[in-house]
Image (cartoon, rainbow, N blue to C red):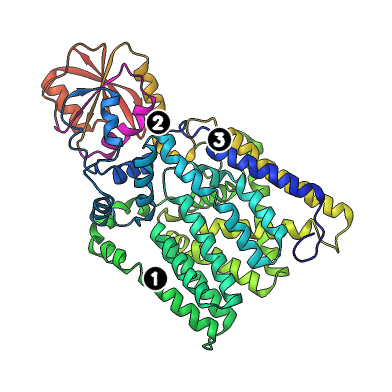
Amino acid sequence: MTRNGKITPRWLHFFIIIVLLMGIFFRFVNLDRKVFWNDEIATIYKISGYTDYKGAFNGQIITISDLRKYQRPDPEMSVIDIVKELTTWDSKHAPLYFVIARFWAQWFGSSAAALRSLSALISLLVFPCIYWLCLELFQSSLVGWVAVALIAISPFHVLYAQEARMYSLQTVTILLSCAVLLRVIRVNTVLGWGLYAASLSLSIYTHTLSALVAIAHGIYVVAIEGVRLSKVLVAYLIAASVGLLTFLPWLFFILANYDRVSKTIEWQNKTIPLPSLVAYWEINLSRIFLDLIPTYQTDTDFSSFKNTWSIYLIRVILIMVGYSIYFVWRYSSKRIGLFIFTLIGVSALPLVLPDLIFGGIRSLNNRYLIAFYLGIHLAVAYLFATKITSASAKFWQQKLWQIALIALISCGVLSCAIISPAETWWNKYYSSESIPIARIVNQTKYPLVIVVDDYNWSSRTHVWSIIDFLEPKVRLQLVVEQNISRIPDGFSDVFLFCPSKELQDGIKKEHKVKIAPVFEGTLSLWKLEKL
């Protein structure tokens, strides 16, 4: 029996426990299999202390193991030094995750599996947090169990639980701050409001977009309490102010480095046709329940989706999400509806509206919409928990909704089973191209790969993703010159990794060689051949 008196099917708890165990398994299996992508490489930059890597680009011919020393934390850089580097080098990212990751790397190593295990471990805290949130919001343990099952095998959450970034920690802190807020509104204690201020501060110091959750909380409290200065409203204003004020020092660094920050997010201003934007929204929303397509490129007509059944399933899931939102609006209490709608709306609209009005792709990056997806999860969990135990529903209707819930969870299990052994997925974006490039190099007898730091982010960044797939026989030469003084001898094949057009022209002119492409995409590989 649930907390609100409804009878829960006996098999359901056992089923959900099995699903939870599967979700834990998928979070920890094959941690080192997928390619390290651009943002994860940036994590290595930040926590190792080698932010410029000038020591690596010295022109010497080195092995892969020689290069890996730059992935390990620099013993001469303390955690305080790392934070100082962040304040000037990349202040748009809040420091909490990177501080934790630095300590983790010192204790357990900085390999792909080691760093990703931190995110996987943190992601386990999502389960008690979302369960507690459901108890506070719905006063129903069944909704909590259903929500745990859905998020346990959510392809989206499993993918980011295996990424060396802050998104698992952000998910936990968002759920924690929401649960603490609802509880402290109910009990109204000084200690509770202090914990809320702390949880809010932790969330924003994990990711700056968590500030949108704080705004959603403010709208919710005002809507519930009214504009009158009640004890709860006054306590909330004080606690929220304290939590937000703790972020002022980091906000100062963001504003002080505004020009640098602006340049690093210029990619968000890229415009795409509105139908393509909508298509991305649809696919990204469905990916929190079903994800069978590894590509990150989406066509307006879904032509990149070779399996037509996946298109139908996406449409069905979108209809289910839409009905869940309608169900919350139509049948839930004012308190429940307001909380879910403010969480969904405030976390999504600041990204969606600028894209619609000015153009851009801010809302395409689903890792920026974690709070939005959590609101969707809550709505869907409420729908199914209500339907499968509804006293007013006929027996066959309850069974039909139970089958629908099993089918939805099965979609997540199937997705995770397909994603887990894959070497790459859509969330790795263009870094996926490192894998076929590495295989081309590995097919040669004794190759040399030349990487030139010519201010081309593709070459100097993605060398760190390609080395995980290169065989030990491969040698590397990292140079900073716009041109190369000489082509080393003694190798069966010499390759250029992501060279600029200017670099290619300079090498052709200086060394009288032919440069032929062997792989072209966002990343590229070119082979040098003597004339």
Q: Residue placed at 33% from the left, 53% from the top?
A: 265
Mark 1 is surrounded, within 10 Å at the Cα level, by few (under 14), some (14 to 19) or many (20 or more) other residues, namely some
Q: Which mark is residue 244?
A: 1
Looking at this view, is 324 or 211 the one in front? 211
Q: Is residue 172 left or right of residue 531?
A: right
Element at label 3: helix
Q: Is residue 94 left or right of residue 351?
A: left
Q: Is residue 466 above or below residue 367?
A: above
Marks 3/1: CA–CA distance: 38 Å
Q: Which residues are magenta?
A: 455-483
Of marks 1 and 2, the one in the foreground = 1
Q: Is residue 481 magenta?
A: yes
The three-letter amino acid code for the residue at tag 1 is Leu
Marks 3/2: CA–CA distance: 17 Å
Q: Residue placed at 66% from the left, 64% from the top?
A: 135
Q: Is residue 45 above or below residue 212?
A: above
Q: Earlier in the sequence, mark 1 or mark 2?
A: 1
The three-letter amino acid code for the residue at tag 2 is Glu
Q: Earlier in the sequence, mark 3 or mark 1?
A: 1
Q: Is residue 41 above or below residue 262?
A: above
Mark 2 is surrounded, within 10 Å at the Cα level, by few (under 14), some (14 to 19) or many (20 or more) other residues, namely many
> Do the numbered discs 1 and 2 sit on residues whose CB atoms are within 8 Å?
no
* Numbered marks: total: 3
Looking at this view, is 330 or 20 the one in front? 20
Q: Quadrant of the N terminus?
A: bottom right
Q: Quadrant of the C terminus?
A: top left
- Give the residue at mark 2: 433
Q: Which mark is residue 419?
A: 3
